[in-house]
Image (spheres, rainbow, N blue to C red):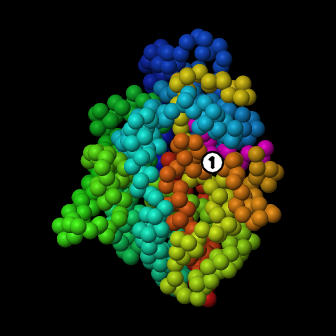
Amino acid sequence: MLTSLLVDGGLFTIVGVLMFGILAVSAATLIMFTNSRSSKTFSRSLPYLLSLIPIVGNSLAFARHLDCYHEWLTGHSLERDGKPFALRLLGKNDIMYVSKPEHFDEVLKTHSSNFSKSDSVRDIFDDFLGEDIVLINGERWQLHRKILANLISTRALRDYMTPIIREKVLELQNVLKQKSKINRPFDIYKLIRQFTLDTFVEIGFGCKLGLLASGKEHPFELAFDDANCISMERLIKPTWLWKCQRFLGIGHERRLREAISEMNAFIVNLIMEAMEMIKNVKTEQADESPPSKNIMAILLNTKETISPTLARDIALTGLEAGRNTTADTLAWLFHALSHNPKVLSKLRNEILTKIPEIGKSESYAPLYEDVQELSYMEATIREVFRLYPTVPVIPYHCHRDTLLHDETFVPAGTDVFLHLFAAGRQSSVWGPDVMSFKPERFIDEQTGKVLKDTKYSAFSSGTRVCLGRNLAMLELKITIAVIISRFQLREVPGQDVRPILDLTLTMKNPLMMNVELID
């Protein structure tokens, strides 16, 4: 994905362009890089990495470490015991990385009025994601949040979404049973991504893609992955460069335009199908509530004024979250359990003890109520989020000079990235066993209940707390309960299992596993 784009198209081309830009416009870019900051601001300098080079800043070091982006930044964070540090990239705002709970609280709560979603980051992803709720501010954000909050209610989760998740999980179970008979390694990551896309398209639009049954990749998947990777590539290109390429329709920007066109065609078709279903229901049952409660049907029936563009952006937000975040979490969980058999055994025992029906009938999938009291499972999911956060970096922008509690000065105009990947690896926060996969750290020894841990930030906090967290946890719990209770997954040894630079914690390579049906 991103790595192949950078190698094939490529990393060396980008570095070459950077050096050419330096020689051609060094004086002008030097002014641009300073972002018109005052000498007063620079009198209190940011703690830059030592790889800072005149004019280019940390751009070359950044480019060299793209293949291990999170590990590289985490290493620098650990060297500083979690203290903030900054990067200066060619043609970008300075970026400060923070990775301690107290710094997260200051950005999200204490000084929240000084921080908003980064305009520069939104500029990068605007073509791809549009008005995604994670990128926008102000009244538009409030409108999106109000609409989404109404769509994902507890009643909707229990009465409408749970039956769909249960049906899809049993379809996934059937695919795994077939895989166990073939007795060959397969890419479980690819399979899970098909499962989550299949599931959310039906939850969101009432449409059945049939990806699990066919086993084929959908054109939307390929277009989405291309658009995602090329948008991420913009992070390391000077803004003027990728905007010039976009204007001329050349290079990867041309493919981005084509991929977005393919995505939009798919989403518009889903919206049109949802609208047609609503129309038919209203015609047949004018005085009754429509039986279909998919998210798009509810959205199109809302009293709010919904433009086609807004409907597209909300639909894409759901598809992005519903497919990628859940699939990534499941993949990292199966990877972690493969290396921690004691945790796997305790998790399986809890499932079979608290949901006895799941061991009696292979056609049974847990109900909404079944998964609400699975403390060890929730702790296991939280431990996955700690070490493998679904969204590893959350970008913000500081628009007012801010002094943090530890005397770190954040100048106005700085992008501030909350690095959750590094946050979960701080021994000063989590203890000397920080790299051990240990769900027990989230369980109260006295009560056996899950702790309300303020160090835990997987779903963000404050006014920006994730609206889809309950849906995500519901799908995760039902899926884990079925798969772990009925199958033994064994990871093929010797694989290169690590993340790439992406919006979510995407695996760089396939995750090959063998599966065995448990009697």
Task: Name the one closer to the observer, 358 or 413.
Answer: 358
Residue 19 location (% of width, % of height): 49, 26
Q: Which residue is drawn at 75% across and 58% down?
A: 441
Q: Which residue lies furthest to the front in this view?
A: 287
Res 516 visible: no
Query: Which quadrant of the figure has residue 106?
Result: top right
Task: Name the one closer to the observer, 399 or 23.
Answer: 399
Residue 320 vertical position relative to residue 141 in the rendered view, above or below: below
- Provide the secondary structure element on which disc 1 rests: loop
Residue 439 located left or right of residue 280: right
Q: Residue furthest top?
A: 39
Query: Can residue 234 be found in the magenta stretch?
Result: no
Residue 73 located left or right of residue 32: right
Query: Can residue 421 be found in the magenta stretch?
Result: yes
Q: Which residue is drawn at 32% across and 35% down?
A: 246
Three-letter amino acid code of the residue under disc 1: Ser
Q: Which residue is drawn at 38% across and 76% down?
A: 213
Res 325 visible: yes
Residue wearing tag 1:
457
Residue 459 located left or right of residue 435: left
Q: Residue at x 40, y 36 (%)?
A: 139
Residue 222 vertical position relative to residue 341 in the rendered view, above or below: above
The span picked out in magenta is: 416-428
Residue 364 location (% of width, % of height): 52, 82
Residue 62 location (% of width, % of height): 57, 36
Which corner quadrant holds the C terminus?
bottom right
Query: Which quadrant of the figure has residue 212?
Result: bottom left
